[in-house]
Image (spheres, grey):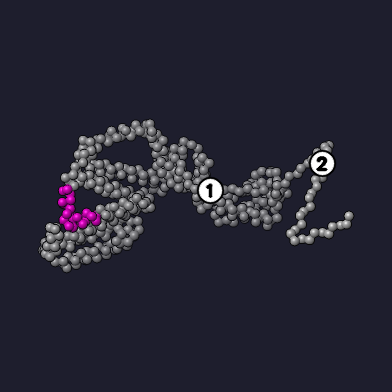
Amino acid sequence: MEFLENLQAEFRDSAAWIELICVLVSLAVAYGSTVWVGRRAGAKPESVWFGRSTFDGLMFPLLSLALVYAARVVVGHHQPVFILKAAIPILVSLAVIRFFARVLSAAFPSSGPMRLLERLVSWLAWGVAVLWITGLLPSVLAELESIHLTFGKTTVTLRTLIEGVLSSGLVLVVALWVSSTLERQVLMPSISDLSMRRVAVNAMRAALLLLGLLFGLSAVGVDLTALSVLGGAVGVGLGFGLQKLAANYVSGFVILLERSLRIGDNVRVDNFEGQITDIKTRYTLLRAPNGKESIVPNETMVAQRVENLSAYDQRFNMSTNVVVAYHSDVQLVQQVMRDAALAQERVLKDPAPIAYLLNFAADGLEFSLHFWIADPSKGQFNIRSDVNLAVLAGLRAAGVELPFPQRVLHVQGGGAVLPPVPVAPAAPAAGAQKPASSPA
């Protein structure tokens, strides 16, 4: 084939060993510079520039590409080049793959579809690199330019459509990268409140993604004035069928802006008690101490009664009840219960545990012990069990009686006396000898 003959001719005309040395030197300099800069900057594993290792980030292929391109320009003035010419598309493809992979892994750390998208980008980038090296890329682009697609009154070529999709994807990934960088470098140090930070991140990401989408549509050739019709249709849909959905989204921003509920608060909603683990734009996630999660629409969090059990801090109140005999020393029981709670590491010393005489029950005096913990996410049943065990041991050591339920039945006289109920003798145990029968 003609392009293979051209490649062979270019290879014969070039001094391959000089170009190979230039490529190796460029890669070595790029590697050393990346390692030095990464150590000086204190690069983290989630960094897009450096990644988990030197070869895993964006810095290494970009520096290599710049050095190889400079070497190609210098060597190309004196002789034909082949290896340097082929190295440029390879490094460009590697830089694109590294950029997409690092940004998507940072924005969506545990997403299967994102892993599939990374593979698709890799295959596409290496395919374009092969076409570029072999010289078939102009022919493929010309063939794509000759294929026309019609959408209503708009006619676009297949090349324009593919370039628009690729440019839109690139802009969206850049928007994700910018939003993640601003969140990490600007919002996290300046905004300590997690809820307000989430509002700023969501608003910034939505704005950047919208700009990227508009840029992609314009690159494809879509008339943006046609979006006004789409906006009207969306407004009608919101007015009729999407009222609940729109209310949930608006309620989510209201919750985040008002800061009436925050991530980490312990709340009770519709008889479900749990900790707020995340506030999305449409729903709020609650995690119960037993591990169960509840998805609560944001409209419910705004329109219905919600009990905030943490009162804007991490102190969580717990209680346990115990019944002792009526002749017990009240002060001694209260002191034993308080000491049992204070003996646990997770129980806070301030506010101190309090023991109340709650009720004069039918079987004895009912006491209620109230104590506070600062880490409800570590479990509530386990700390309540530890406190109960300590209270039981303390009361037994102090000689306090724990009564069991008793009932006294009084039978009024004047009625007929019932005859005694005969009781059948117990059956003899297996293997036991029968008593000898008495003579008649």
Coordinates of residue 427 in the picture (x, y in percent): 76, 55
Coordinates of residue 392 in the picture (x, y in percent): 65, 54
Residue drawn where x is 30% and y is 62% of the image: 54
Task: Report the front residue among 193 and 415.
Answer: 415
The span shown in magenta is: 125-143
Where does label 2 land, which residue? 418
Where does label 1 land, which residue? 316
Residue drawn where x is 43% and y is 46% of the image: 278
Sooner in the amino-acid sequence: mark 2 or mark 1: 1
In reply to whether residue 139 is colored magenta, the answer given is: yes
Disc 2 to disc 1: CB gap under 8 Å = no
Residue type, numbered disc 2: Leu
Instruction: Give the spatial CA distance, label 2 vs label 1.
Output: 59 Å
Please indicate, yes or no, whether residue 57 appears anywhere in the rendered image: yes
Coordinates of residue 101 in the picture (x, y in percent): 31, 54
Residue drawn where x is 27% and y is 58% of the image: 59
Which of discs 2 and 1 lies nearer the camera? The answer is 2
| Tag 1 secondary structure | strand
